[in-house]
Each structure stands twice: as structure tokens, then as C-alpha cells.
Image (cartoon, coloured by chain):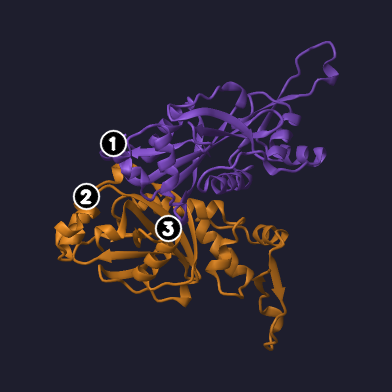
Chain colours: A orange, B purple
């Protein structure tokens, strides 16, 4: 992490959403010996595309690879400049501050959200962090800097994009029931939906493919399975 | 423009949309003695919020103030790093290059779009530029760096947001006819719309307020005027 390696003043942060089947969750890392919770983030190498840096950083910080990732906002207020916080993290990890003075400068942060199928992954922390865990969206720890604001904006973007971007496609396994899908929508919107209204609305979008029921001896009670069409 | 004044590696560009009544247009500046066309842009002062910098920069480059402005994407590919272009601009404006070496470094650019009522404004160029003019969206000059890509993404965002963000509200005068509004939609979408279908769809959104016709002697032929509700 030499100064000449990274572009100064530019950071990125990722809001990684997962769905447990019941709840919407977010990946949060905790820095060694600090009590500081943060979104997984990082910096951009001089010879690296911004979007590639985010994929690399997310892989380094969480072990996650090949996931749905979308840029949603760049946070650039002066108020997010709090060098004492980065200083605490560096000192707690026994880094020599003189080598990392560039990290104590002002940063803007380009924020991305990711959507992953919660059951497929085991996040792993990196060297700076002692944990990388899932937290319910409504039970997050206090986050450092403006990371709570970044999460709020990510969630709003997810809500705005719910139908247009087929958000559910990335949070569910390939085959799911109508009830599974309704739970994703409810978790993202933070409210209960009427079953019949939801079903009519989703089916009217023409994005779902319905599959034949598997014979199970009581097939008439088994729900249909759906997948997202081409 | 001293190095210590601006954050290195961070620029912004604005895609300013205006609607002539018939065509969607964009503000383009031309740099002195270079033949280079570009979006109006600028840099962020160390003590300045990113969003404030964009408003300041837009005012400096175009004379425009108090306009609807929204961030839509941050462009960070390595391929956009072409120091020879900035060098040409600086030399053509007889700037001492040694003072501006920081401007020859790699930049990411945070892009914003603006929506303005074309008839209300007379854009004015700044010291670096010899013009700041409206161009039809489908008749743009060749733009420098990745600015054509920035325009394309801005237009796509505008299309995606057409109904959700009440884009038309900022491109039209306060009172307008249904035909005026249809022309805005057609200019943004780049296609003709069916009059009846458009009218039914817009009215079903419940966002328009219809006003009484003014008596004109042939009132039954005058179209209704509308405004956007609260």
C-alpha cells in the first residue's frame, strides 16, 4: 500500500446485500482492536479501472468473487473527512503512520451495491479486519464515517430499481416459489404486501417462467416453482 | 488554479439538457484555438463539497445558476487518461505547463446531468473557452476523451427516470399543453408516441393539474394547459 500505488483522494465502498430467506442482510467488517464497523472498501491502483478495483477490493476484503455489482453514488462531502478515524485503524494494526499519511487525507468514495445469494457464500475477513459478518438491515451496528448514509442510499436505490433491474434475480436461488419472491420484496421494501395483489402485479410483468410441479404424492399442495426468464 | 487548491485525480462533468420545444439539446463548450469540444466540467476544492463544486463549476463555465442537477455516474477507466489532450488545451491558452502538471495526471470524473428550461437561459463561456452553445443531441460535434460516452449514459439515465423523477417538469415552462409534454417525451425517447396512448398513460399517473381554458373567442379549439401538481 504505497502512496504511488493508489490514486489519492479516491476510495470505494460496497454495500453487499444478501437475503436469508426471511431477512435482508448486509456485510459489515470490523477493524482489529478498534470497535469500528465499516462497509468493505478500498482504493484504486493507478493502472486499474475503477470498476475493476471495486471487484478486486471486494474479493480481498470478503472473499467474494463474480457477483452482481452496480455503482450507485459518489459521496464527496467535506464532512466525511475525519483523519483521526483512519489514524485509529492504522495504529491499532501497528502500521507505521509515516508510511500511510496519504490515507489521512480527504477522500471521496464511489459507492457500489452488490446482490448475492446469501446461502452460496462464506465471507472471509482480510488482514485489517477481525470479522466480516452478515447483519440484518434493521439491526446494523453503528458504522464509521458516513457509512450509515451510504447504506440508506443503497437501500433506496434498491427500492427504486426493484422491478426495473430484476433485483430479486440476484438474491434468490435459480428456482423459487412465489412466496419466496414476495419475501424478498417485503424485506427490501420493509413492509408486508398483499399476497394476491403482489402475485398479479409480478405475473403481469411477464418476467417469470413457471415450471411443472414435481410429483411428490401430494402434488396438489406443493407450490409452483418459478425462475426468471431469458 | 494551484495544485494545493484542488483535490488531485478528481474531476466532474455536467450534461446540461435543454428542450427547445422541438428538440433535446446539450450544452457544449469549445476550447480556445484547439478545435476541442467538451462537456462543461471542473475540479473540486479541498474545502468544498463535491456537489457544491459542480454547481460552482457549472456557473463559472456556463453562467447558469440554481438549476436541477443530479449525479448519475462516476467514470473511472484508465483509458480516459490522455494527458496530451489537457496539454493541448493548456498550451493553446498560453498557460505555463510547469504550474499545471497536476492537470496532466489521471482523473476520474463524477458526472451530473442538469435539466433546464432552454428559453430561460443564455449560456456564457468562461476564460478557457471561446464558446458555450446548445447542440441537438443527435448532432453533437466529436467530443474529447470519453465525453460522448458520458452523454450516452446521461441520456439513458434520463430515459430510465422519465416518469419517476418528473423529468419534464424541469424542461418545460410552468404551464404547458399535453402536446408540449408529449414532445419532451418524444425528444428524450427518440421516437414518436401515439397521442391517445401517451395521454391516457400520463393522466393515469396523477401528476398533472389541468387548468381552466382562458376565454379567447374560440376557446373550444384552444388546448387545455397543464402544470405539475404539488
Q: Residue drawn at (68%, 75%), measured in percent from left and top?
A: A224
Question: Camera-side residue: B183 or B220?
Answer: B183
Q: Which residue is mark 3?
A: A50
Label 3, secondary structure: give it.
helix
Chain of the residue under label 1: B
Q: Nearer the viewer, mark 1 or mark 3?
A: 1
Q: Residue furthest bottom?
A: A217
Q: Residue drawn at (53%, 25%), measured in percent from left and top?
A: B123
Note whether residue B46 is visible.
Answer: no
CB contact under 8 Å: marks 2 and 1: no
Q: Which residue is mark 1?
A: B2
Label 1, secondary structure: give it.
loop
Q: From mark 2 to mark 3, how far is it between C-alphas? A: 23 Å
Q: Position of residue B173 (x, y in %)?
A: 63, 24
Instruction: Write down the quadrant of residue A36 in the picture.
Output: bottom left
Q: Earlier in the sequence, mark 2 or mark 3?
A: 3
Chain of the residue under label 3: A
Question: Camera-side residue: A63 or A30?
Answer: A63
Q: From mark 1 to mark 3, how far is it between C-alphas? A: 26 Å
Q: Residue drawn at (50%, 47%), measured in percent from left and top?
A: B145
Question: Camera-side residue: A7 or A222?
Answer: A7
Q: Nearer the viewer, mark 2 or mark 1?
A: 1
Q: Residues within 10 Å of mark 2 (few under 14, many from 20)?
A: some
Label 2, secondary structure: give it.
helix
Q: Position of residue B51 (x, y in %)?
A: 41, 38
Q: Is residue A208 above or below residue A142?
A: below
Q: Is residue A173 above or below residue A12?
A: below
Chain of the residue under label 2: A
Question: Camera-side residue: A59 or B27?
Answer: B27
Q: Position of residue B2 (x, y in %)?
A: 28, 36
Residue A83 - label? 2
Amino acid at each position: 500500500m504505497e502512496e504511488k500505488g493508489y490514486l489519492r483522494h479516491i476510495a470505494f465502498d460496497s454495500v453487499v446485500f444478501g437475503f436469508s430467506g426471511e431477512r435482508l442482510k448486509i456485510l459489515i467488517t470490523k477493524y482489529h482492536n478498534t470497535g469500528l464497523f465499516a462497509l468493505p472498501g478500498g482504493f484504486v491502483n493507478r493502472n486499474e479501472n475503477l470498476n475493476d478495483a471495486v471487484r478486486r477490493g471486494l474479493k480481498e476484503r470478503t472473499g467474494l468473487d463474480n457477483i452482481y455489482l452496480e455503482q450507485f453514488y459518489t459521496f464527496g462531502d467535506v464532512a466525511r473527512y475525519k483523519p483521526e478515524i483512519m489514524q485509529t485503524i492504522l495504529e491499532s494494526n501497528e502500521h507505521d503512520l509515516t508510511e500511510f499519511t496519504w490515507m489521512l487525507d480527504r477522500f471521496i468514495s464511489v459507492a457500489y451495491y452488490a446482490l448475492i445469494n446469501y446461502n452460496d457464500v462464506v465471507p472471509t475477513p482480510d488482514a485489517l479486519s477481525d470479522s466480516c459478518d452478515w447483519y440484518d438491515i434493521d439491526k446494523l451496528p453503528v458504522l464509521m464515517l458516513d457509512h450509515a448514509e451510504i447504506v440508506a442510499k443503497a437501500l433506496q436505490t434498491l427500492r427504486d430499481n426493484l422491478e426495473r433491474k430484476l433485483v430479486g434475480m440476484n438474491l434468490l436461488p435459480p428456482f423459487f416459489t412465489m412466496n419466496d419472491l414476495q419475501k424478498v420484496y417485503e424485506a427490501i421494501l420493509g413492509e408486508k404486501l398483499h399476497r394476491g395483489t403482489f402475485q398479479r402485479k409480478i405475473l403481469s410483468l411477464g418476467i417469470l417462467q413457471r415450471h411443472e410441479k414435481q410429483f411428490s404424492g401430494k402434488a396438489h399442495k406443493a407450490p409452483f416453482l418459478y425462475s426468471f426468464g431469458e
